[in-house]
Image: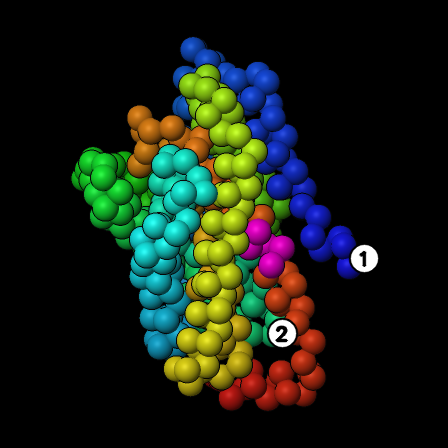
Amino acid sequence: MFLRRFFPDRFTCALILTVALASVLPCRGATASAFSVLTDLAIALLFFLHGAKLSREAVVAGMTHWRLHLTVLASTFVMFPVLGVLLRPLLSPLVTPDLYLGVLFLCTLPSTVQSSIAFTSMARGNIPAAICAASASSLLGIFVTPLLVGVLLESHGQAGMSWDAVGAIVLQLLVPFVAGQVAQRWIGRWVGRRRAMLSYVDQGSILLVVYTAFSAAVLQGLWKQMPLPVLGGLLVVNAVLLAIALLMTRYGARLLGFKRADEITIVFCGSKKSLASGVPMAKVLFAGHPLGAIVLPIMLFHQIQLMTCAVLARKYAARPVEVSRKLAETSN
């Protein structure tokens, strides 16, 4: 039972199988164009459903805890990019330049929504604040991530991000999200009762992007340029980033005087990166780049953060229930 927590979940297995399929049977030509259109439609549907599902009441309830939200946003959009730049001389020799470009992109991404809230709940943290913090991070990421990518690309010695790319992100992600919010009064409850449907759209859109991205990368010789030692180096790079982020969010929250329930929320919302947002954004922002190498660090980081945070959440939850309830009450 102890070892089961370290095994990949079904979605991770699906990602691995998708990469294997793209490596053996990459799509090309008219098929690739058809998959690209289908992927765009799936991504738009995904953000529309997220907009329809997001509860405005939950967001308003959590917005009053502004110190916590600023801490999470600073961790997500300031601490991570700074770490990516500062650690570059130490970590970049372990991977290829394209892979480290993917690591820098990873550092600019917003936090996850579903898993951040799930781990916060599992660890008995401040759930309303987690809902607000993760949702705000995801929404702000539509604007902030492209801008940060532009800055980091210039520091990486490449051309900065154009406003056309930012506009494409807004059109493909924000417009469907806003449309979903507008439609929430009519379909919000219906979508909320069908979480499995949203999960299928969420995961299906990611698998489509991964398949098309890795198909193109394989046709460009991705695996010939990426030996096993490089993949091992990428594992080390991601593990180091996550370990530092977890330590800084945990002890930073304590240094700032947050209660334990708020500390849990900051740790799980401030240390995670969204695969669901990252893969669609990469498709738009890195047109012309080797997309397979860009999304590979995100895919690997996704699995590492899930396994690590599952163990950490159980450790938080292991404290006495009476103490947990008292801390949760005093944090509100």
Please, is residue 5 above or below residue 37 in the view? below
Q: Position of residue 140 (x, y in %)?
A: 32, 56
The residue under the point 49% across, 50% down is 238
Report the label total.
Answer: 2
Kindly identify the residue that appears in the image at 54 percent across and 37 percent down.
229
Main SS class of the magenta portion in the image: helix
x%, y% of residue 181?
38, 52
In the rendered image, which residue does mark 2 sit on?
Answer: 316
For the N terminus, the quadrant is bottom right
Q: Is residue 128 visible?
A: no
Residue type pointed to by label 1: Met
Quarter of image, res 60: bottom left
The residue closer to the viewer here, 143 or 43, is 143
Q: Which of the labelled discs sits on residue 190, or is there none? A: none
Rendered location of residue 287, percent (x, y): 31, 29
Residue nearest the observer in this picture, 6 or 327: 6
Image position of 277 (left or right of 2): left
Inspect the magenta stretch and tell me whether residue 208 lies in it: no
Asked if residue 124 can be seen in this view, the reply is yes
Circle 1 residue: 1
Residue 15 % position (x, y): 59, 36
The alpha-carbon separation of the residues under discs 2 and 1 comes to 19 Å
What residue do we see at 37% from left, 55% from top?
87
- The span shown in magenta is 304-308
Which residue: 39% across, 45% down? Answer: 92
Q: Is residue 63 above or below residue 117?
A: below
Residue extending furthest toward the top: 29
Q: Residues within 10 Å of mark 2 (few under 14, many from 20)?
A: some
Q: Residues within 10 Å of mark 1 (few under 14, many from 20)?
A: few
